[in-house]
Image (cartoon, rainbow, N blue to C red):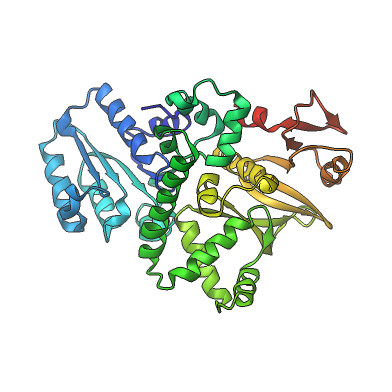
Amino acid sequence: MIIRERYMRQILDFMDKPVVKVITGMRRTGKSVLMELTKEEVRRRGAEENQIFSVNFESMQFENLKDYRVLYQAITKAAKAANGRLYLFIDEIQEVESWEQVINSVRIDCDCDIYITGSNARLLSGELATLLSGRYVEICVFPLSFGEYLEFAKTNEDEAGLSQEQHFSNYLRYGSLPGIHEMKWNDAVLLRCLTDMFNSVLLKDVIKRNKIRDIDLLEKTVLYLMDNIGNTFSAKTISDFLKSQGRKLSTETVYTYIRALESAFLIHKVPRFDIKGKRLLETQEKYFVSDLGLRHATRGYRDNDIGGMLENVVFLELLRRGWTVRIGKQGVQKVDFVATQTDKRLYVQVCYILTEDNTQREFEPLEAIDDNYEKIVVSTDSLINFNRKGIRQRNIIEFLLDT
């Protein structure tokens, strides 16, 4: 198992601390592997096997424990038998109805260190947040960063010998879910694998969890979102488009579908921010996908989508680094990303290649911002120290690997 340092550091910082470790993220992003790595660390620190209680609700082996009362009894029994503190690991806990009561009760009744994973963003939006206010920490797991992707690629002999630029091309085409590096590296196999992953997320975490009945309209909504990454639009835009295709779908239902897709971590909504007025705007947001490979498995890969793909990659990287990300409005001009983090701010423009025709268009919105925060233009160019009025151009691979 390859250690993903970014996440393991966060987990180990809270090991044996009196907070529940909640690991969230889309299915197949590597949450279960992080749990296994954490168990290895617990053993390394001296815990005996009877101090480790581990359940993965994706396995039928634990079907009987989906009754929250049975689960609670099993955990408390294990805690009494343990030679010291019990280390509790539960994968995909959202499969248990009333699981929040179990976790809160176990936290109170037993000497235990708790780690749970879930594939739903609502995990922390309901009763758990109320019961555990101030007593949990969320660790959100994303698909592989480009740096992690290069490490995983070393494990697949079919990827050996590829240049960094070739790897980046594959990163855009096939995405960054860890499982693809276990496959034979050819287009048909990888796209079949990605299609199966997409269908699994859509079925388990969107359709079944939200009891969606009109699957055809949901799929059409998903495809519209996939087709329009990097573009600003609203739920009404989708509703009007579907009406033009002969399918009636209310704006409110579109919002319901979008919320379900967001909760499954399949897409990310990015609201607009008025830079001058310093306020969020309520319309014309953008949506990005959690993994480009899933997009291309459903819509196909198109070279002329490169601008949106690059924006998607930069957006996800900013999230991984802990930034809160908005799209910017500066008068009539647009800034691709306004990223904030405590007292820091970063403005980012993303484009494919800088040319005589577009250089002014990319730099002008940043030049018009009247503050001293860092401003960069990210592109595929390999220009050396290109700087215009204090605004730097960054090569996208260099930016992604900059730790």
Residue drawn at point x = 50 percent, y = 29 percent: 148
Whether residue 391 sits left or right of residue 283 in the image: it is right
> Relative to residue 377, is residue 15 drawn left or right?
left
**Count of numbered labels shown in the rendering:** 0
Q: Is residue 353 above or below residue 265?
A: above
Residue 198 in the image: above or below residue 55: below
**Residue at 64%, 76% in the rendered image:** 244
Q: Is residue 186 visible?
A: yes
How far across and down, in percent of the image, does residue 189 sit? 43, 41
Measured as percent of width and height from the top left, residue 227 is found at: 61, 57
Residue at the image point whose x is 88% and y is 34% from the top? 389
Could one spot residue 129 in this view of the protein?
Answer: no
Quadrant position of the N terminus in the picture: top left
Counting from the top left corner in percent of width and height, residue 145 is at 53, 34
Quadrant showing the C terminus: top right
Q: Is residue 330 above or below residue 11?
A: below
Q: Give me the residue at 36% from left, 52% from top.
A: 132
